[in-house]
Image (spheres, grey):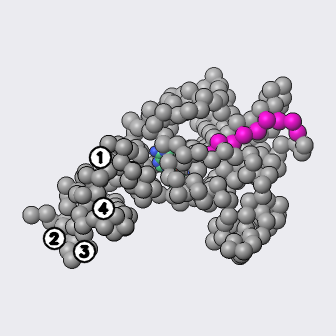
Amino acid sequence: MNTHAALRSPKEFELTDNDFNRLRELVTKHTGINLSDAKRTLVYSRISRRLRELGLNQFKDYCDLIEQRNSNELENFSNAISTNLTAFFRESHHFDYLANTVLPQILANNHDRQRLRIWSAGCSTGEEPYSLAMVVSEVMPKNSTWDIKILATDLDTQVLATAKRGVYGPDRTSGLSPQRLKRWFTAGKGDQQGKVRVVPELQQMITFKQLNLMHDWPMRGPFDVVFCRNVVIYFDKPTQRVLFQRIAELMPAASHLLIGHSETLFNVSEQFELIGKTIYQRNQ
Ligand SMILES: C[S@@+](CC[C@H](N)C(=O)[O-])C[C@H]1O[C@@H](n2cnc3c(N)ncnc32)[C@H](O)[C@@H]1O
């Protein structure tokens, strides 16, 4: 007798312990995300939507579908499970540090090369890379010859589409200063009425790409700054260790790594030194 299932009736679908464990294993295998028992309701609500859209009656059939070789459903599955909460200038002290310390250092030290590379790993709907682009544009000298590129990647293709579009409603932009709103956005027209659009100048700095951090990466770096914030919170420690080792390989000595407010590299990586609140510098 499945106690969870009994408690859950009369729900539209039955999520047995076996289904839940299978789904959990599939999530970890494909995304690195670890789901605790407490995520049962979340899994039910997000995956039952997929069952409805696919006309399936059981979670078991959905698991079978995902397990098929090269399943087309994997993308929807990853999109459904990922948590995409983000905001412009989220954890604003990171952007202050970038503006006041990191970028002035890079301006001084990379003066000959005049090259700046930033990676927003797990960029969600784009607020993080656009915030980075705003700060970089505000700090770097006007009309400079610097070669500046921001790479913004995420597993979830739906959030990436929003990020690429760069159109945001007032609920997303309410935390932005009036100066930044005026300088970096234009009023939306037509079906974007009431919304704002990021100016092309910022969009041109950013390359948005779908990338699963668990898979091979096409880029070689080196990155001067990496933002990997509020992503590994869902990964177990061994997965985090491997990930930060791989990130470290793309970062030269003295480059900066910024992680989320509830994350730490303690017992995860020895390649970085903690130099501020969730701000790390790559070892020499
Ligand atoms: C909570 S959001 C964080 C967004 C932003 N970095 C911030 O701090 O505001 C986490 C993002 O990580 C992405 N993500 C989760 N697992 C991933 C993986 N294996 N590869 C790439 N991105 C992943 C999710 O799709 C989601 O958009």
Which mark, residue 11?
3
Residue placed under numbered mark 2 in the picture: 6
Q: Where is residue 173 in the image (x, y as percent from the top left)?
A: 68, 67
Alpha carbon separation for disc pair 3 and 1? 27 Å
Up the image or down, 135 lies above or below 237; here it is below
Q: What residue type is labelled 4?
A: Arg
Q: Which secondary structure lies at badge 3? A: loop
**Camera-side mark, 4 or 1:** 1
Marks 4 and 3: CB-CB under 8 Å?
no
State the CA–CA distance, disc 4 to disc 2: 14 Å
Task: Check disc 3: other Cα within 10 Å, few if <14, some if 14-19, many if 20+.
Answer: few
- Dot 1 or dot 2, earlier in sequence: 2
Q: Which residue is drawn at 38% across and 35% down?
A: 238
Residue stretch in magenta: 144-152
Q: In this orientation, which residue lies closer to the viewer: 245 or 67?
A: 67
Amino acid residing under circle 3: Lys
- Residue 255: image quadrant is top right
Q: Reply yes or no: does residue 127 show up in magenta.
A: no
Q: Where is residue 138 in the image (x, y as percent from the top left)?
A: 82, 50
Q: Report if residue 20 is visible in the image.
A: no
Q: Distance between the residues labelled 4 and 1?
A: 23 Å
Contact (Cβ within 8 Å) of mark 1 with mark 2 = no
Q: How far apart are marks 4 and 3 (CA)?
A: 14 Å
Look at discs 2 and 3 and give the one toward the viewer. Answer: 3
Residue wearing tag 4: 40
Q: Residue at x 50, y 30 (%)?
A: 245
* Disc nearer the start of the sequence (4/1): 4
**Quadrant in which the N terminus appears:** bottom left
Quadrant occupied by the C terminus: top right
Q: Earlier in the sequence, mark 3 or mark 1?
A: 3
